[in-house]
Amino acid sequence: MLSLALPLLSGALLLLQAWLLAHVLGEAIAGGVPLAGLVLPIALFGGVLAVRIGLGLAGEICAASASEAIKRRLRGALTSAILAKPPVWTAARSGGALSSLVVEQVEAMDGHLTRYLPAMAQAAILPLAFAVAVFPVDWMVGVLFLVTAPLIPVFMA
């Protein structure tokens, strides 16, 4: 669960990071504020960036841990199912194919469990959150986010 929640929280902090960047650039370029007057917003930007990096790392660690637990349960279930079959069934199959199923094929799910599923959750939820945040500022961009957000998972496949 944390493997999905932490990247979403990191994505939500992206809104704050973007606002801080826009504030710093707006004050520096349009407002003519000297660098000394922008130290706090720049430090906050760096702090949010560091928190996002930490959340991303923690999310990766949680995803790897969850993936290993899922694969361990799946291997146990497959092994139990194979052992529950009568000897005639197992004799009719290649031992290499059965062991490949339990070891290699389950291990091949790692990328799907650790990378794809968290990315899919982010791609489905974050554009909607961004649309809600942007809508009061620019309704056209908000509508664009709402219209294109459902297409993101289609293009991820």
Image (tube, rainbow, N blue to C red):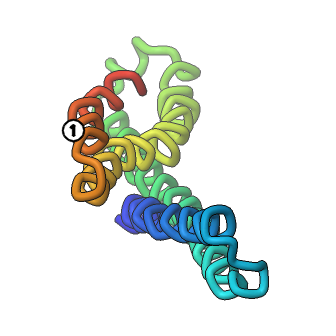
- Identify the residue shown where x is 70% and y is 86%: 37
**Residue 58 visible in rendering:** no
Rendered position, 109 above or below 36: above
**Pointer 1: residues within 10 angstroms few (<14), some, or many (20+)?**
some
Residue 2 locus on image (x, y percent): 40, 68
Residue 83 locus on image (x, y percent): 36, 38
Rendered position, 119 above or below 148: below
Residue closest to the eye, 119 or 100: 119
| Residue type at tag 1 | Val
Residue 134 locus on image (x, y percent): 31, 54
What quarter of the picture does the N terminus occupy? bottom left
Residue closest to the eye, 116 or 35: 35
Rendered position, 2 above or below 144: below
- Identify the residue shown where x is 41% and y is 52%: 70
Rendered position, 6 above or below 74: below
Seen from this angle, which residue lies furthest top? 92
The residue tagged with tag 1: helix, strand or loop?
helix
**Which residue lies under the disc numbered 1?**
143
Q: Is residue 94 left or right of residue 45?
A: left
What quarter of the picture does the C terminus occupy? top left
Name the quadrant containing residue 152.
Answer: top left
- Identify the residue shown where x is 46% and y is 70%: 16
Seen from this angle, which residue lies furthest right? 35
